[in-house]
Image: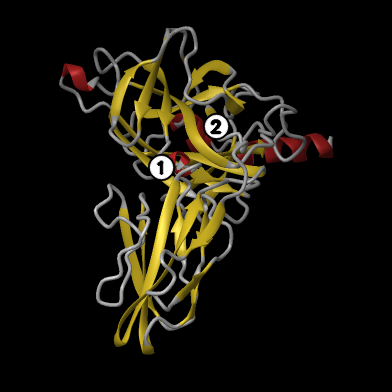
Amino acid sequence: MKRLALAALATAALTPLAWSQTKQAIPYSGEITHLKMDYATGEITTLDPAGETLVSSCYANNAFSGFFTQIGVVNDEFVDWGIKSCGLSGVACEIIFGYGTTALDPGLGGPGASMNIAFYPGYTGLCGALPPPAIVYGFTGLPGSPDGVSAAAFTITVDLTTAGFFAADGPLGWSYIAQDTVSGPLLITTTGTCGGPGDPATGTQDCFDIYSPMGGACLGTFVFGTAGIASFWMEIGEDDGSFGPGSQAQRFGTGGCNVGVLSTGSPPNVASTWDPSITTAAVGAATIDFIAISSLPVPGGVCSGGLEILIDLSAPLVTFAGGTGFGQPFAIPIPPNCRLIGANLSAQAGQVGFGFGLTNAIDITVGI
C-alpha cells in the first residue's frame, strides 16, 4: 500500500493539476503536410510525397503518435532528449521538425506559426544541467491553419547546408521554444520510461522538461495524460564523413621576394579552428600579424616593391583577420558549413612593423 501511495505521489509530481488543465496532448487525425525550407533564404516549398530529403536522416525520431501540443507561453521551452548514434561526421546538414498549430496561415492574412528550435549536445534530461545550445534556429510566419480555429500539422525539412551545427554521438537534447501561444511539436511515440531505459531506437523517454524562459529555470519534468507520447518530432541528417580530414601545404611563389614564413596549423576541418602562425618574421620589429583567405590562389611570379601576392584578393570569397602579436597562432574558426567540406582555399599572411611584409601562402582543402 505504501509503495502504491508513493507511486501516486510521483505521478502527481510529474503531472501537476495546472498542467493537466492548460497543457495537453491534442488529438490530430488530419493530413500532415510535408514541406522543405532553405534556411539561408527562408524559401518554403512542397516536399515530394515520395519522401524527398536533402540528406538521409541518421537520427529519426518520427513515429507520429496522433497528437500534438501547444506550448502556450511565449519563450517557454519544451526540451526533449535522446541518444544519437549516427556513426557519421557529427556535422548536421539537415533537420526535420514537426509542429501543429491553430495560427491562421500567412497566405490567408494570418501570422502563421512561429517557434525556435535549439539543440543541446550532452543533455540527459530530468532537469539536469542544461549546457549552452550548439545553435538556436528561428522560424517565423510558418504555414498554419486554414481558418485560425482548426488545427493543421506540418513537417519541415530544413536545408542547413550553410548553417549547420556539430553534435557528437551520444546524449542530445532538442527543444521547441514558443514564439506564439497556439503552436507546438508533433508528439512521437516512445517506449522509453521516464528516468529509466530509453527507447532502443532513439533513446527518448516518456517525459520532457520545461524551462521558462528559454534556458532559464527548469519548471520540472512532465508527462501527458496519454502514456508513451511525450517525445517531440526530430530528425537529423549529417554529412557522412567520407571526405576525410582537411589538408594544407605551403606555397612559396618565386621564393625570393617574401621573407616571412607562414607555417601550417592543425587540420582545417569544419566545426574546428585552424591555427597557422608566422614563424619567420616578414619585417623587422613586427607589431601586428594579419592573414587573408581567398577562394582562389595566384601562381605568383611577380615581385613588386619587395612583395609577392600569392592569393586572389578579388575572388568571390576573401576574408581578412588580424590583430595577433608576432608568432601567436591565428585562430580562424571554420563553421559547420556543409558547403565548405572539400572546398579549396588559399591563405597568405603579412606583418606591419618597420615597414610592411608578406609571407608565403598555404593552400588548404577543408575536411571533416
Query: Callout 2: 10 Å neighbours few (<14), some, many (20+)?
Result: many
Residue 183 appears left or right of 330: left
Mark 1 belongs to which amino acid?
Ala
CB under 8 Å between callouts 2 and 1? no
Nearest to the observer: residue 161 or residue 102: 161
Q: Name the residue that disc number 2 marks.
A: 236
Q: Residue furthest left?
A: 109
Residue 86 appears left or right of 306: right
Residue 51 horizontal/vertical position (percent): 49, 12
- Report helix, strand or loop for mark 1: loop
Nearest to the observer: residue 176 or residue 209: 176
Is residue 350 depicted above or below 17 in this figure? below
Nearest to the observer: residue 358 or residue 119: 358
**What residue is rendered at 25% in x and 18% in y?**
148
Residue 126 horizontal/vertical position (percent): 64, 46
- Report helix, strand or loop for mark 2: strand
| Residue 79 visible | no
Nearest to the observer: residue 18 or residue 223: 223
Is residue 273 depicted above or below 163 in this figure? below
Residue 132 horizontal/vertical position (percent): 51, 56
Q: Name the residue that disc number 1 marks.
A: 163
Tell me how far mark 2 sits from mark 1, CA to CA.
Answer: 14 Å
**What residue is rendered at 54% in x and 28% in y?**
235
Earlier in the chain: of badge 2 and badge 1, it is: 1
Residue 152 horizontal/vertical position (percent): 36, 15
**What residue is rendered at 41% in x and 74% in y?**
256
| Residue 238 visible | yes
